[in-house]
Image: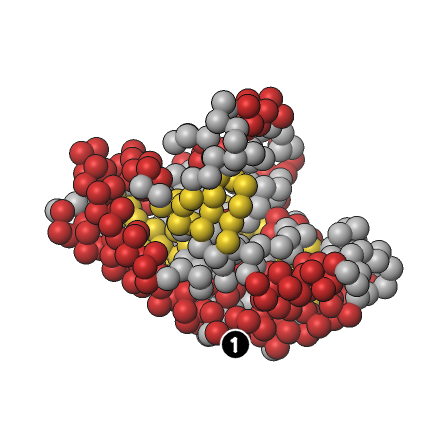
């Protein structure tokens, strides 16, 4: 691999995968130059030519301890030599991991494991529809809940422009079961609930939206949402695929003081191994034994379960959530200081272990419409210049940077040096 300087692997990638990668967001990294990854450890990632980057993307936030963490790798290796896949009954690792999750979310009774966040959200929606006997699920613009037919609406397009499906191939009939409201807009929420609340099976929310940068839900908005769910008999689903561990080690319900009926978790819970879960009370989860179908050959995969156990153990030992927040606060401070010193209009947003920067606006957006006012071209230049200087950040202006426990002070200093130069170049596009 490391000796292939003729572009053969890149030609193969283009021949085998649409755009040279498995998905649209991964393809965007190729927009700067082809990125073919061959190795990662800690906060470092290396391409097939041996070029090394300090990684502030961290697999969309799924890696929170650091790439190939020694303790997680050891537990997975031990599991690999003991049990890979059983397909019958339940594994001991599955039980252990589920118990750990319930200790983090003591308001819940049961856990259902899936292989991805999209699957977990699909199951949460199915459970809510079965529990209420209603079809409609309400989501909020700029919130991402997976690629499936029931959630691929208004991720990039504000609700003010109407309900917009953002993928071809989604049956038109699906639209009648999904409604979209503007994020953090109490008036729009109350108006909709007053007219249609009795039709709603569930409202699903990212407590901190991560597909328009980093934008937390406002406490008053979440509190009102909970009350309207109670009034109209709807369920509240928190999509914490990103926020659990990265923003809160006991879930965002603890932060808001609001109970969600169902919560989905994933990404960082196994430090990069594929697993997500739905958590809920017996009143809803018992439907899995009374007509709600859930299946999956690889669900609760022993290797992912072992990784999850090791990750949560280490997260507790090292105070992972606090450490991520501290590192993210430092990185956000770096970006704010640089912007101020260079006279660049930019808003920096940080919550938990995630950070975003919006060029061309002077305050953190509260919703998708405000986020779209930022200068995306300037951000893309910033990402390109960071890459040229050995720092890997998302090239998408509506995504975010992620911190990991493995990020050192020296690596933050390297980020600082690169960002000073990158922001100076990006300034020319404002």
Q: Position of residue 135 (x, y in %)?
A: 65, 49
Observer able to see residue 352: no
Write down the quadrant of residue 149 in the picture.
Answer: top right
Q: Name the side, left or right, on which 348 lies relative to 305.
A: left
Q: What residue is rendered at 34% in x and 51% in y? A: 356
Q: Name the side, left or right, on which 417 lies relative to 74.
A: left
Q: What residue is rendered at 21% in x and 47% in y? A: 420
Q: What residue is rendered at 66% in x and 65% in y? A: 75
The tally of labels here is 1
Above or below residue 49? Residue 219 is below
Above or below residue 394? Residue 68 is below
Q: What residue is rendered at 41% in x and 69% in y? A: 323
Mark 1 lies on a secondary structure that is helix
Q: Nearer the viewer, residue 216 or 67?
A: 67
Residue to which mark 1 is pinned: 317
In which quadrant of the rendered image does the N terminus lie? top right
Q: Position of residue 185 (x, y in %)?
A: 38, 54
């Amino acid at each position: 691999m490391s000796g292939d300087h003729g572009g053969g692997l890149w030609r193969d990638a283009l021949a085998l995968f649409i755009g040279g990668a498995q998905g649209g967001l991964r393809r965007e990294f190729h927009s700067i130059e082809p990125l073919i990854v061959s190795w990662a450890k800690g906060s470092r990632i290396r391409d097939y030519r041996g070029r090394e980057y300090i990684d502030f993307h961290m697999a969309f936030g799924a890696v929170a301890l650091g790439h190939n963490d020694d303790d997680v790798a050891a537990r997975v290796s031990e599991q690999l030599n003991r049990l890979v896949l059983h397909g019958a009954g339940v594994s001991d690792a599955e039980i252990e991991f589920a118990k750990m999750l319930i200790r983090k979310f003591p308001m819940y009774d049961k856990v259902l494991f899936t292989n991805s966040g999209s699957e977990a959200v699909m199951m949460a929606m199915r459970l809510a529809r079965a529990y209420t006997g209603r079809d409609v699920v309400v989501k909020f613009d700029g919130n991402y809940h997976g690629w499936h037919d029931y959630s691929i609406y208004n991720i990039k397009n504000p609700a003010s422009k109407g309900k917009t499906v953002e993928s071809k191939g989604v049956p038109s009939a699906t639209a009648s079961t999904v409604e979209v409201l503007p994020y953090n807009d109490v008036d729009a929420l109350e108006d909709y609930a007053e007219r249609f609340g009795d039709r709603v099976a569930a409202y699903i929310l990212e407590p901190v939206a991560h597909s328009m940068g980093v934008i937390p839900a406002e406490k008053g908005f979440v509190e009102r949402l909970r009350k309207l769910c109670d009034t109209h008999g709807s369920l509240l689903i928190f999509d914490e695929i990103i926020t659990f561990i990265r923003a809160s080690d006991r879930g965002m319900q603890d932060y808001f003081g609001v109970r969600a009926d169902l919560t989905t978790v994933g990404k960082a819970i196994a430090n990069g191994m594929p697993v997500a879960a739905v958590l809920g009370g017996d009143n809803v989860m018992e439907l899995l034994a009374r007509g709600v179908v859930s299946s999956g050959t690889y669900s609760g995969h022993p290797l992912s379960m072992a990784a999850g156990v090791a990750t949560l153990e280490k997260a507790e030992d090292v105070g992972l959530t606090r450490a991520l927040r501290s590192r993210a606060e430092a990185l956000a401070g770096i970006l704010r200081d640089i912007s101020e010193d260079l006279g660049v209009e930019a808003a920096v947003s940080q919550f938990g272990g995630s950070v975003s920067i919006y060029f061309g606006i002077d305050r953190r957006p509260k919703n998708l419409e405000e986020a779209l006012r930022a200068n995306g071209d300037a951000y893309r230049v910033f990402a390109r210049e960071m890459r040229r200087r050995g720092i890997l950040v998302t090239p998408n202006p509506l995504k975010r940077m992620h911190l990991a426990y493995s990020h050192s002070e020296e690596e933050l200093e390297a980020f600082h040096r690169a960002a000073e130069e990158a922001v100076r170049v990006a300034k020319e596009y404002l």
